[in-house]
Amino acid sequence: MADDADVAQSQIELNIDCALAKIKHYEGTSSEFCEECDEPIPEARRNLLPGITICVDCAELAERLNRVQI
């Protein structure tokens, strides 16, 4: 009979498996347009960073905002 620790461990393993599946799905699939501003993402950036979903400007803005919050 499974106890609470076994159930929790199973849930953790399932969550990890789901997260890894999402990473593998998106890895290598770059967006042609930025998810934030809908501007085109240059082909060179998409080739350099497989799986990229935001443009340079939005990435820089997000980085600056993260620095301010810290």
Image (cartoon, rainbow, N blue to C red):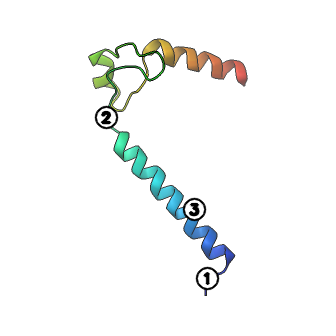
Indicate the amino acid at tag 2.
Thr
The crowd level at tag 1 (other Cα within 10 Å; few <14, some 14-19, many 20+) is few
Callouts 2 and 3 close, C-beta under 8 Å: no
Residue at the far bottom in the pictured view: 1
Q: Quadrant of residue 31?
A: top left
Residue at the far front in the pictured view: 38
- Give the percent coordinates (x, y) of residue 6: 61, 75
Q: Which of marks 2 and 1 is nearer the N terminus?
A: 1
> What residue is drawn where x is 61% and y is 88%?
1
Indicate the amino acid at tag 3.
Ile
Callouts 2 and 1 close, C-beta under 8 Å: no
> What residue is drawn where x is 39% and y is 28%?
52
- Give the percent coordinates (x, y) of residue 17: 46, 58
Callouts 3 and 1 close, C-beta under 8 Å: no
Q: Is mark 1 on a helix, strand or loop?
A: loop
Q: Considering only vertical position in the picture, is 57 above or below 1?
A: above
Indicate the amino acid at tag 1.
Ala
Q: Considering only vertical position in the picture, is 41 above or below 2?
A: above
Q: Residue 12 carries which label?
A: 3
> What residue is drawn where x is 41% and y is 44%?
23
As measured in the structure, the alpha-carbon distance from the residue carrying label 2 to the one carrying label 3 is 27 Å
As measured in the structure, the alpha-carbon distance from the residue carrying label 2 to the one carrying label 1 is 40 Å
Q: What element carries label 2?
A: loop
Name the residue that disc number 2 marks: 29
Name the residue that disc number 1 marks: 2
> What residue is drawn where x is 61% and y is 73%?
7
Q: Is mark 3 on a helix, strand or loop?
A: helix
Placement of the C terminus among the 4 image quadrants = top right
